[in-house]
């Protein structure tokens, strides 16, 4: 029987079609992925979901049992890694200890060209972009973690790969260094016009670097899309929970005939959603992001359709934000506010509070 090739990502720069990999106790299952040239994708998901295996299969380290990988329209599924024009960076840097920073950066380029002046100017240019041009004579053992990773990034970018893969490149770094390197990396990959796939557990990498995000679980990609769409319009209950929706309810559509869908949750509350459903009494998952909930001490005077009253059950300060949990007739809603808003509203556990949220922010996920 012919293999079904999934073609939603027709003519994309990178296409991964129906990819399956068997590694004994772990499998990639019918993975489909697409990326445009010069796009930056971050893949997220729990530990053990297959993110690194997917990267290494694209790089050519694992042979798939089925499916195809296309890069710039060329089938690279069975090419050896060195023939794919793909660079990969890991969190442990992998620098040559017997070479200084200049020699490490120049290593791959020397295999491609012989002109020493071109090599030198290219290395200096890459080093300047990554702010390590003052370290070119240093040996790797004298470098900090951030300096080592910038050297590894420069070495990968200088050869202008067709595709740059990064497997948690900043996970071993402190927060300040991570943030600094993120800013440098974003500009560098833009300058080199590099197409990137980056595996990360840090949502800040998604928001600060990526145009596209993919969410994996148990060897499958559950959703891929523009970052804002995946975070605000999850199509799977796991995706909703993983990207921090927090307000997830089982619901039943009771009226979908008016352009606004009325959905009942917990058998006692009617919410209004802009998502359209024409079939009444359809079971759906209802999701509302916590940052889309507005708190007030009085009924909110506006056209917002969803306005509820409840009792504050929890107030928790987490970093620069405050999580507020409110019980509405036995149903718990979670929202996020700033400490200044908390003080202004005088929100305390046991207080009565009003909460409002727009119908456009009530997302319905089909249970089928």
Image (cartoon, rainbow, N blue to C red):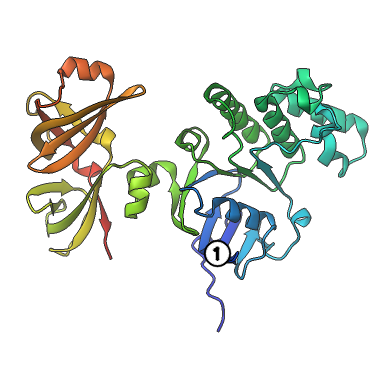
Does residue 247 appear left or right of residue 232 in this picture?
A: left
Residue that appears at 38% across and 46% down: 242
- Residue displayed at 10% across by 43% down: 330
Whether residue 245 is situated above or below residue 252 in the rendered picture: above
- Kindly give the residue lying farthest to the bottom in the view shown: 1
Residue 74 at x, y percent in the picture: 68, 62
Give residue 217's quadrant in the image.
Answer: bottom left
Foreground pick, 13 / 185: 185
Quadrant hosting residue 334: top left
Q: Residue at x 21, y 19 (%)?
A: 342
Q: Is residue 32 left or right of residue 329?
A: right
Q: Quadrant of the N terminus?
A: bottom right
Label total for image: 1
Residue corresponding to mark 1? 25
Decide if residue 77 is on the left or right side of residue 275: right
Task: Give the image location of residue 133, x and y in percent.
Answer: 76, 21
Residues 207 and 139: in front is 139
Observer-nearest of 47 and 225: 47
Specify whether residue 256 is in view.
no
Residue drawn at point x = 92 percent, y = 39 percent: 114
Helix, strand, or loop for circle 1? loop
Residue 4 visible here: yes
Q: Answer left or right for 92 relative to 314.
A: right
Picture layout, residue 319 above or below residue 253: above
Residue 310 spot, x, y in % from top left? 9, 34
Report x, y in % for residue 154. Answer: 73, 33
Q: Residues within 10 Å of mark 1 (few under 14, many from 20)?
A: few
**Image quadrant occupied by the C terminus:** bottom left
């Amino acid at each position: 029987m012919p293999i079904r090739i999934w073609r939603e990502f027709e003519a994309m720069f990178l296409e991964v079609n129906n990819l399956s990999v068997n590694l004994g106790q772990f499998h990639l299952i019918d993975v489909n992925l697409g990326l445009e040239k010069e796009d930056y994708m971050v893949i997220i998901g729990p530990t053990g979901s297959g993110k690194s295996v997917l990267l290494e299969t694209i790089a050519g380290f694992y042979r798939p049992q089925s499916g195809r990988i296309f890069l710039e329209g060329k089938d690279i599924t069975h090419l050896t890694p060195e023939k794919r024009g793909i660079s990969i960076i890991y969190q442990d840097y992998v620098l040559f200890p017997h070479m200084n920073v200049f020699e490490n950066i120049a290593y791959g380029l020397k295999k491609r060209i012989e002109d020493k002046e071109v090599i030198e100017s290219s290395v200096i240019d890459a080093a300047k972009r990554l702010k390590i041009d003052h370290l070119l004579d240093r040996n790797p053992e004298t470098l900090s973690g951030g300096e080592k990773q910038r050297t590894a990034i420069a070495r990968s970018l200088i050869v202008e790969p067709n595709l740059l893969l990064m497997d948690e490149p900043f996970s071993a770094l402190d927060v300040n260094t991570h943030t600094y390197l993120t800013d440098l990396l974003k500009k560098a990959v833009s300058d080199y016009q590099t197409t990137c796939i980056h595996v990360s557990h840090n949502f800040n990498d998604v928001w600060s670097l990526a145009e596209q995000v993919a969410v994996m679980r148990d060897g499958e990609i559950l959703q891929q899309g523009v970052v804002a769409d995946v975070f605000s319009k999850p199509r799977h209950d796991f995706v909703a929970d993983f990207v921090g929706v927090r307000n997830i309810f089982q619901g039943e559509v009771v009226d979908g005939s008016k352009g606004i869908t009325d959905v009942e949750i917990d058998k006692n509350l009617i919410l209004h959603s802009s998502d359209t459903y024409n079939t009444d009494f359809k079971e759906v998952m209802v999701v509302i992001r916590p940052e889309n909930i507005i708190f007030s001490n009085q009924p909110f005077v506006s056209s917002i359709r969803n306005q509820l009253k409840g009792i504050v059950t929890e107030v928790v300060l987490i970093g620069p934000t405050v999580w507020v949990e409110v019980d509405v007739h036995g149903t718990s809603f979670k929202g996020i506010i700033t400490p200044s808003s908390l003080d202004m509203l005088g929100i305390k556990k046991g207080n009565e509070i009003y909460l409002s949220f727009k119908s456009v922010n009530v997302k319905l996920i089909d249970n089928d």
